[in-house]
Image: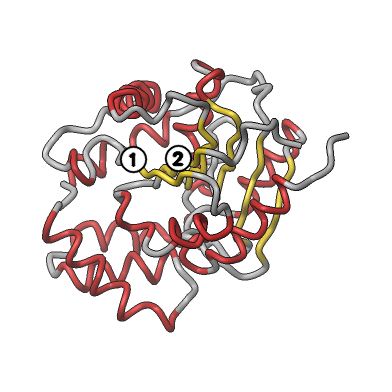
Amino acid sequence: MPEAAAGQHWLLLRGLCREATHWGNFPDLLQQAFPQSTVSTIDLPGTGRYYQESSPDSIEAITAQVRGQALDYGLLAKPVTLLALSLGGMVAWEWLQRYPHDIAAAALVNTSFAGLSPFYRRMRWQSYPQFFQLLLERDLYNRELAILQLVSNRQDLYAETAKAWTAIQQLRPISLANCVRQLKAAARYRPSQRKPETPLLILNGRGDRLVAPACSDAIHNKWQIDIFKHPWAGHDLCMDDGAWVANRLQDWMNQPTV
């Protein structure tokens, strides 16, 4: 059962090469599920409002920058509840290790850790050709559509979302160099083996074709962290079924105290 402060101030962290705007309507769904709470987003270095800056190539340095930005924006006046996707989940774990008092609870979505899972599961080997091809794709719409086809199982949303994501990339393009730095950071990150005392939850889409669901299982098994599994959603679980995510977070917050 998360502590009383959990769920009052949400802070959302996106994943590899994505900015806060890529959450789409999910922050609104989360706000509806927690109407008395605040919901904030923040960009990782090298993305969004920081797209013209270089991203560090380590999770430790990325975490330090993200926390500094959160302090600057006054987001840490009270403990936050992190919802962190993929690479954002690694940042959340490092943040929990370094500054546990900043965080009331954390939910990790489709993340993975080196040392717990082999590299060919952390980025499924079946996706390698598609992933490297899309990094080199010049046509923005085709690139964003290819990313969607890799991270989402909602084919009905592909055309509309690819259009929106193309507009984001035109406004605030993330560079290939920053993508490579973030990939390097994710590949090298080996988390502390100490389980944080902060309440934790894992959310996993069993239809994830980018990061094997076994990676979430490995984190669950290593530290006996609560886990909810979605039967068909892909890597971008919050886009594929944001209502399910919001409902599971409500369930987690409403668990009776043991």
Identify the residue shown where x is 47% and y is 76%: 154
Identify the residue shown where x is 41% and y is 42%: 13
Of residues 188 and 156, the one nearer the viewer is: 156
Q: Secondary structure at mark 1?
A: strand
Horizontal side of residue 251 vs 84, given as left or right:
right
Counting from the top left corner in percent of width and height, residue 91 is at 44, 32
Count neighbours of disc 2 (C-alpha within 10 A) and say few if under 14, some if 14 to 19, many if 20 or more: many
Of residues 235 and 137, the one nearer the viewer is: 235
Of residues 94 and 122, the one nearer the viewer is: 94
- Residue on which disc 2 sits: 11
Q: Can you tell which mark lies on residue 94? A: none
Residue 137 in which image quadrant = bottom left
User: Given contact means CB atoms under 8 Å apart, are the residues at marks 1 and 2 in contact?
Assistant: yes
Q: Residue extending furthest right?
A: 258
Counting from the top left corner in percent of width and height, residue 121 is at 55, 49
Counting from the top left corner in percent of width and height, residue 149 is at 39, 71
Q: Residue extending furthest front?
A: 36
Q: 235 above or below 179?
A: below
Residue 245 in which image quadrant = bottom right
Q: Can you tell which mark lies on residue 42? A: 1
Identify the residue shown where x is 31% and y is 79%: 160
Q: Quadrant of the N terminus?
A: top right
Alpha carbon separation for disc pair 1 and 2: 7 Å
Q: Which amino acid type corresponds to the residue marked 1 in the rendered image? A: Ile
Mark nearer the N terminus (1 vs 2): 2
Residue 131 in which image quadrant = bottom left
**What color scheme is it?**
secondary structure
Horizontal side of residue 100 vs 257, given as left or right:
left
Q: Secondary structure at mark 2?
A: strand
Horizontal side of residue 126 vs 231, given as left or right:
left
